[in-house]
Image (cartoon, grey):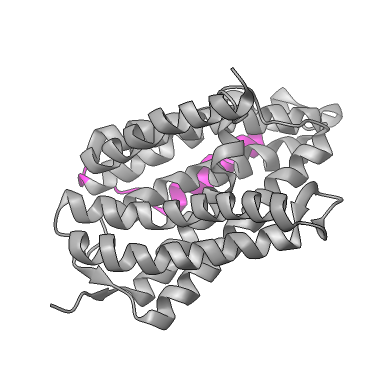
């Protein structure tokens, strides 16, 4: 089976399953996000080690996996974590370098990569903010809102690939990602805007009774597309520093978890911020 066939087959299976889990929400969504965060953290530590750092792998993986579960616990009103808890956890990692890394183990780099890994992969928990937004009244609406920035991220990826293959001649940032072109970046942005206009009219409005003003739709799509491409370039940068092509081979035809979710890790918090300012109840 060719790489393209494996990519398509995986997408056909994974996309409906992912949407179904977002719809079910609750413990199902928390578990999925926790697994994604844990696998992504494992890959991040692998990249960091190839770059010369020595992160605390177990702490990074457990910490990243815990964040979606903590968010779910907050939603259930079982937990009430504060910034002080996060500060103490970060200090514990820093203190551990005294005993586990020492002078020769580049302690500052070890602590920094560990803490950053947890914060970075923990960003997947922002799916909860979209799925359970204050405007949402049922699971159908929550799923429609949560999938909005995710779909625009996919559209950006598809548009960039298609336009880049057909028209690409000017390299976007060859030192970071030689295959990306300016034409592809523009194509991803255009497709994201078109998909956003259609999605708001035919999915978000009827399913979630939510909308955005026409100009806000365009601004939102442009911002999400741009941020998605920056997220992709950011992961390409750290992989290039480490001298590796894919974050892992966990996903057939797609590389690793970070290779598939790098853009979303940037997109999700930005989408939450923008939608809180732009969402309006849909007119009857």
Pinpoint residue 258: horizontal percent, then vertical percent: 59, 37
Magenta span has 92? yes
Identify the main secondary structure in magenta: helix
Look at the image and give the residue range highlighted in magenta: 76-96
Against 22, residue 40 (above or below) is above
Against 171, residue 281 (above or below) is below
Pinpoint residue 270: horizontal percent, then vertical percent: 49, 63
Magenta span has 280? no
Determine which quarter of the picture holds residue 256. top right
Q: Where, quadrant-wise, is the N terminus in this rendering?
A: top right
Q: Is residue 255 left or right of residue 217?
A: right
Residue extending furthest toward the top: 1
Residue at 34% across / 62% down in the picture? 199
Determine which quarter of the picture holds residue 184. bottom right
Residue at 65% across / 34% down in the picture? 44
Residue at 50% across / 36% down in the picture? 64
Against 44, residue 149 (above or below) is below
């Amino acid at each position: 089976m060719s790489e393209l066939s494996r990519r398509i087959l995986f997408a056909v299976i994974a996309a409906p399953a992912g949407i179904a889990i977002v719809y079910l929400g609750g413990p199902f969504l928390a578990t999925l996000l926790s697994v994604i965060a844990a696998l992504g953290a494992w890959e991040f530590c692998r990249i960091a080690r190839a770059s010369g750092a020595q992160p605390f792998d177990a702490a990074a993986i457990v910490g990243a996996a815990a964040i979606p579960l903590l968010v779910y616990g907050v939603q259930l009103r079982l937990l009430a974590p504060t910034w002080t808890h996060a500060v103490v956890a970060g200090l514990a990692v820093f203190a551990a370098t005294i005993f586990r890394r020492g002078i020769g183990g580049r302690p500052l780099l070890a602590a920094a990569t560990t803490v950053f890994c947890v914060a970075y992969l923990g960003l997947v928990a922002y799916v909860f903010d979209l799925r359970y937004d204050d405007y949402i009244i049922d699971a159908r609406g929550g799923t429609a809102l949560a999938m909005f920035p995710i779909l625009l991220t996919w559209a950006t990826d598809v548009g960039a690939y298609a336009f880049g293959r057909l028209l690409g001649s000017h390299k976007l940032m060859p030192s970071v990602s030689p295959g990306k072109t300016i034409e592809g970046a523009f194509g991803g942005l255009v497709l994201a805007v078109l998909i956003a206009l259609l999605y708001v009219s035919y999915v978000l409005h009827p399913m979630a009774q939510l909308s955005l003003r026409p100009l806000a739709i365009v601004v939102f799509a442009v911002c999400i597309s741009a941020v998605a491409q920056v997220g992709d370039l950011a992961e390409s940068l750290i992989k290039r520093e480490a001298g590796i092509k894919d974050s892992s081979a966990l996903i057939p035809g797609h590389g690793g978890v970070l290779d598939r979710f790098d853009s979303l890790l940037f997109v999700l918090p930005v989408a939450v911020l923008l939608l809180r300012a732009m969402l309006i109840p849909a007119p009857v």
